[in-house]
Structures are given as C-alpha cells and as structure tokens.
Amino acid sequence: MTTVNLGKQHPATYKGLIAFSEQADAAVRQAGIDPLLAELVKIRVSQINGCAFCLRMHTRDALAKGESTDRLAVLAAWWESQYFSATERAALALAEEVTELPVPQRRAWDDGSLTDEEASAISWLAVVMNASNRVAVTSHYPVSP
C-alpha cells in the first residue's frame, strides 16, 4: 500500500477529528486545567505513540507558553523526577493509562489529585491526541528541520 494522507483522502472525517480536538481543548479549559499541563499530556501521549509531527508541534507550543526545557527533557520519565506536581503526575499517569489501555486495576493516577471534571477532560484530551497521532503517523506527515 502506498502512503495515504488520511486528511486529504477523507477531509470531512478529518474536520470531524479537528472539531473533536477543539471540544477536548474546551473541556480542558472548562475544567481549569493549566494550558502547560495540557501540552505536557499531548506531548506524553505523542511520545508513547511515536508521533514526531505532534511531538514537534506540541513541544513548540509548550515552549511558547513558557514550559521549561528541563521539564520537557524529563517528561518521558516524569515519575523519576521531582519536576511535576501531584496534579501533573496524576494527569500524566491517567493519559498513559488511556493511551496504553492496561488491565483495569492499574489506576495509579487515581489518588485524589484530579477532580472528576479534570479526570474527564484529561481523558478526552488523551483520546483525541491518540486519534491525532494515529492520523499523523499513518499519513507519514513530514517532519524535517
């Protein structure tokens, strides 16, 4: 099979994904989640999925919003560092759980650091990032310097 750009092949479906993404972003804002945390979740999900296109985009977005290079450098091993708050740690663990779909008993994120609204918003953000990563990786979006 040749590489197919999914967005160009089915633009209406891709526009639906963009609308879905905008709704997830709105849920994040409504839940009062820090925009930097939202970028960290997007980056972490993209790291797990190996999506270079989304990694570059959301790393740039995080830097533009004031994220530190130190925190970005250790994000792939966030649990080993002291850079992240309890809320950030819970959100990252939840995003990983949504991305990896482990056995139900894991729930390492469920320590009371996130409200139900925050947990729902982070879950939707991870779901939409997983979908976006799969579109970008499957379509082989170019990522060149």
Image (tube, rainbow, N blue to C red):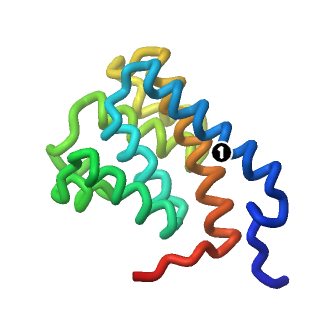
Q: Compared with residue 84, is residue 50 higher up or lower down, i.e. above or below? A: below
Q: For this rendering, which residue is in front, 79 or 29? A: 29
Q: Quadrant location of residue 9?
A: bottom right
Q: Residue at x 62, y 53 (%)?
A: 132
| Structural crowding at the residue carrying mark 1, measured as other residues with C-alpha within 10 Å and reported as few (<14), some (14–19) or many (≥20) | some
Q: Secondary structure at mark 1?
A: helix
Q: What x and y, as percent, mark residue 42?
A: 45, 48
| Viewport quadrant of the C terminus | bottom left
Q: Residue at x 30, y 28 (%)?
A: 87
| Viewport quadrant of the N terminus | bottom right
Q: Residue at x 41, y 65 (%)?
A: 56
Q: Compared with residue 22, is residue 83 higher up or lower down, i.e. above or below? A: below
Give the side of residue 37 with respect to residue 81, left or right: right
Q: Compared with residue 2, is residue 138 higher up or lower down, i.e. above or below? A: above
Q: What x and y, as percent, mark residue 73?
A: 23, 61
Q: What x and y, as percent, mark residue 118?
A: 44, 22
Q: Quadrant location of residue 128?
A: top right
Q: Quadrant location of residue 29?
A: top left
Report the number of discs.
1
Q: For this rendering, which residue is in front, 120 or 4? A: 4
Q: Which residue is mark 1?
A: 18
Q: For this rendering, which residue is in front, 14 or 76? A: 14
Q: What x and y, as percent, mark residue 125?
A: 53, 37
Q: Residue at x 38, y 45 (%)?
A: 39
Label 1 is placed on what type of residue?
Answer: Ile
Q: Compared with residue 65, is residue 116 higher up or lower down, i.e. above or below? A: above
